[in-house]
């Protein structure tokens, strides 16, 4: 079947996964997480000193943990690509990169034509079907896909890669046409995992010190606030020399300060890591991580002023 595409010998062919369904699903979940987190924070601010306060804070903490992970999955889907070349296949999914030399590719076929059973990854949802599973023959199958439907498999001696190009038939057809020309210089085998990037990132002394100081201050604010609350009754969140008595609130609400500060720290951390990928943007990362230190110091000052005003 001809697809009317140009399959020039030296011209890479880039394919992308379907994005619409995965983006809609993940953006809806992200908005819900943000709404639940904001709602929990709002309700905690209005509640008294009882179990409800901590119950309202729970979704806020869960959102703080889940939002960065979901943002990364959205970024991975948007930037994902499968590039076919005469000398091999290049795969990209977020911070996961894989270059497969042509001489290591055993076959490329539709998952419907695979005789064995492919176990799906344990953690998956529309737009993020990623992870590895071990097959009965001892090989691994690694998923870099938007969904489980209409997968294309790339077989190598050590691993099978499960991909989801927008047109599986065109992907297979293009690979076969390129493979027929032969390869004189196969791509060098190359694998990059997110953990490798993070280890390289952590070897940067400036990044390590900035993030370490930011994390220490965020934790210190939480510890100091938690230590002070039992000795306080009511406090005024109005930073004034004189405060009306009806402005007083339970001291437990001071926990909102470290919660908000931690959310800012996590946001700066995630954005900083995103910019850090490119050398020319690393100054933005340092500025973001440095700003989280300043924000923590301002929250410490606010806590001190509130205690002075109490």
Image (cartoon, rainbow, N blue to C red):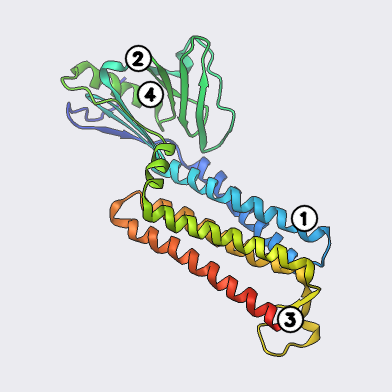
Residue pointed to by mark 4: 169
Which is more toward the observer, 147 or 268?
268
Q: Is label 3 in a helix, a strand or a loop?
A: loop
Residue 234 image point, x, y percent: 79, 76
The answer to which of marks 3 and 4 sits earlier in the sequence is 4
Give the Cα separation between the discs numbered 1 and 2: 53 Å
Residue 40 image point, x, y percent: 71, 59
Q: Is any atom of residue 46 visible in this view?
A: no
Front of the two marks 3 and 4: 3
Q: Is any atom of residue 31 visible in this view?
A: yes
Give the Cα separation between the discs numbered 3 and 2: 73 Å
Residue pointed to by mark 1: 55
Which residue is located at x 45 percent, y 56 percent?
271
Which is more toward the observer, 40 or 207?
207
CB atoms at circles 3 and 2 under 8 Å apart?
no
From this viewpoint, which residue is outermost toward the bottom? 242
Give the Cα separation between the discs numbered 3 and 1: 26 Å
Residue 306 image point, x, y percent: 67, 78
Label disc, if present, on residue 310 of the rendered structure:
3
Q: Is label 1 in a helix, a strand or a loop?
A: helix
The answer to which of marks 4 and 2 sits earlier in the sequence is 2
The answer to which of marks 1 and 2 sits earlier in the sequence is 1
Which residue is located at x 43 percent, y 38 percent?
194
Front of the two marks 3 and 1: 3
Q: Is label 4 in a helix, a strand or a loop?
A: helix
The answer to which of marks 3 and 2 sits earlier in the sequence is 2
Front of the two marks 3 and 2: 3
């Amino acid at each position: 079947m001809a697809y009317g595409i140009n399959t020039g010998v030296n011209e890479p062919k880039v394919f992308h996964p379907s994005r619409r369904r995965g983006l809609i699903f993940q953006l809806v979940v992200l908005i819900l997480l943000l709404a639940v987190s904001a709602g929990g924070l709002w309700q905690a601010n209005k509640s008294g000193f009882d179990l409800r306060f901590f119950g309202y804070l729970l979704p806020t903490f869960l959102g703080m943990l889940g939002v960065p992970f979901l943002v990364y999955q959205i970024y991975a889907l948007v930037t994902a690509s499968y590039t076919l070349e005469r000398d091999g296949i290049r795969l990209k999914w977020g911070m996961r990169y894989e270059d497969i030399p042509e001489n290591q590719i055993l076959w490329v076929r539709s998952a419907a034509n695979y005789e064995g059973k492919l176990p799906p990854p344990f953690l998956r949802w529309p737009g993020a079907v990623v992870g590895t599973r071990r097959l009965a023959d001892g090989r691994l199958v690694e998923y870099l896909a938007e969904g489980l439907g209409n997968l294309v498999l790339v077989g190598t001696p050590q691993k099978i890669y499960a991909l989801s190009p927008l047109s599986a038939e065109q992907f297979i057809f293009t690979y076969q046409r390129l493979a027929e020309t032969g390869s004189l210089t196969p791509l060098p085998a190359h694998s990059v995992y997110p953990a490798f990037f993070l280890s390289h990132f952590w070897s940067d002394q400036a990044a390590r010190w900035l993030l370490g100081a930011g994390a220490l201050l965020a934790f210190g604010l939480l510890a100091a606030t938690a230590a002070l609350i039992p000795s306080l009754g009511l406090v005024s969140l109005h930073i004034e020399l004189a405060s009306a008595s009806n402005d007083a609130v339970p001291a437990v609400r001071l926990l909102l300060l470290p919660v908000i500060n931690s959310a800012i720290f996590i946001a700066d951390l995630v954005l900083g890591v995103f910019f850090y990928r490119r050398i020319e943007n690393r100054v933005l990362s340092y500025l973001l991580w440095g700003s989280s230190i300043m924000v923590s110091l301002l929250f410490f000052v606010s806590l001190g002023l509130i205690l002075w005003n109490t």
